[in-house]
Image (spheres, rainbow, N blue to C red):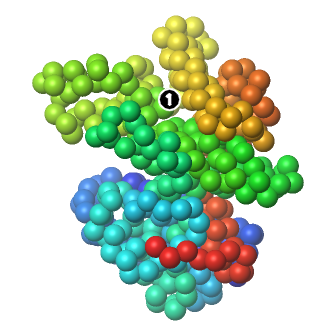
Amino acid sequence: MKILAINPGSTSTKLAVYEDEKLLFEETIRHADAEIMKLPELADQLPYRLESIKEALRLKEFQPSELDGVVGRGGMLKPMDSGTYIVDEQLLDDARAGKYGNHASNLGSIIAAEIAGTHQIPAYIVDPVCVDELSDEARISGLVDIERKSHVHALNIKAVSRRIAAEIEKDLTDTHFVVAHLGGGISVAALRDGRIIDVNNAENEGPFSPERAGGLPAKQLVQLCFSGKYSEKELLQRMTKQGGVYSYLGTKNLIEVEKRAAEGEAEAGLILKAMVYQIGKEIGAMATVLEGKLDGIILTGGIAHSDMITGLIKKRISFLGKVFVLPGEAEMEALAAGALRVMKGQEDAKIY
């Protein structure tokens, strides 16, 4: 079965075509800032991105009529269980309206539906960021006005968990993992029987990352909010795009930060160690969620390519159990695999 996987980002659209599990080709279409700025609303970007995908397929001499299914990256949708979902009108309405938030990934389901509709084949999404499997205890924040929310790198976390479960010859539903997705945002999740029962919301909790502030001292944050120094929009931008490593060192590039630390820059070394410290502490916290019963700890995401950073994390957490390192984000593979499981009858498609 031939499947087209589509993953729209803020300035790019990734696509890949698989025949069953085999990758036939993949492509990353870079969108010039000038072009995207002309189309500030996501709905306005649809024809532009759709045409760029069709052109990429033409250049690969691949006919969309050969496809058996299309799968898109799930965007900001209502809280839902993990799994593969058929793209229906209700899902599309919420994605188009940005009912639960506006993000380029909302276009994943919309583009998938457009291509699938033309060729009368099914369209799916798999494990979007809004996957919510939190336990009741995990939702309690400590203040009745605020409920903890699940906002998680679910696609990659579930994919690497399946891979390690197969490696240790267990079914995912019989495993307990702590998974740390280390990227521009950092999600550290506790998985019990394959379900994400707790996770730090990568936009406002947990370890700081290359660009996000992570959890901050609440009282001082409230005081900063009312200091008059920033508007609400400016402070949110500072916390989610200009925080973390960037706020201290003026760069989000950890390769550069490692180099500066190796050359003896004390501040760069300190910030790297502090980020590792917070990641290790969060992993330890999630281990307690699982009562210390772990099949392993998995380090994944782009930052996991760094032997130095993963080595420092291992020193802090290896006493908890076996540590597996799976660098990168196997998102395209995970999208196609999720669709294939449904198309082959190994799983039932879920309804939004």
- State the image coordinates of residue 14 (x, y, percent, origin top left): 52, 62
Residue, disc 1: 207
Going by the image, does 123 lie left or right of 172? Answer: left
Q: On the picture, is 82 further left or further right than 22?
A: left
As drawn, 273 above or below 32: above
Which residue is more in the foreground, 144 or 255? 144
Q: Which residue lies furthest to the left in this view?
A: 228
Residue 155 higher or lower than 313, as above or below: below
Q: Would residue 14 be seen by someone viewing this image from the given angle?
A: no
Q: Nearer the viewer, residue 200 or 139?
A: 139
For the residue carrying disc 1, how many other residues have a C-alpha within 10 Å: few (<14), some (14-19), or many (20+)?
A: many
- The quadrant the N terminus occupies is bottom right
Left or right position of 342 against 245: right
In-image side of 229 versus 11 (left or right): left
- Judged from the image, the secondary structure of the residue bearing numbered disc 1 is loop
Q: Residue at x 62, y 36 (%)?
A: 289
For image coordinates 71% across by 37% down, the residue present is 297
- For image coordinates 20% across by 27% down, the residue present is 225
In terms of depth relative to the viewer, which is nearer, 157 or 333?
A: 157
Residue 331 in the image: above or below residue 239: below
Q: Is residue 297 visible?
A: yes
Rendering coords of residue 307 (x, y %)? 70, 29
Identify the residue at image location x=53%, y=48%: 135
In percent of width and height, residue 303 lies at 60, 36
**The residue under label 1 is which amino acid type?**
Pro
Compared with 330, 94 (above or below) is below
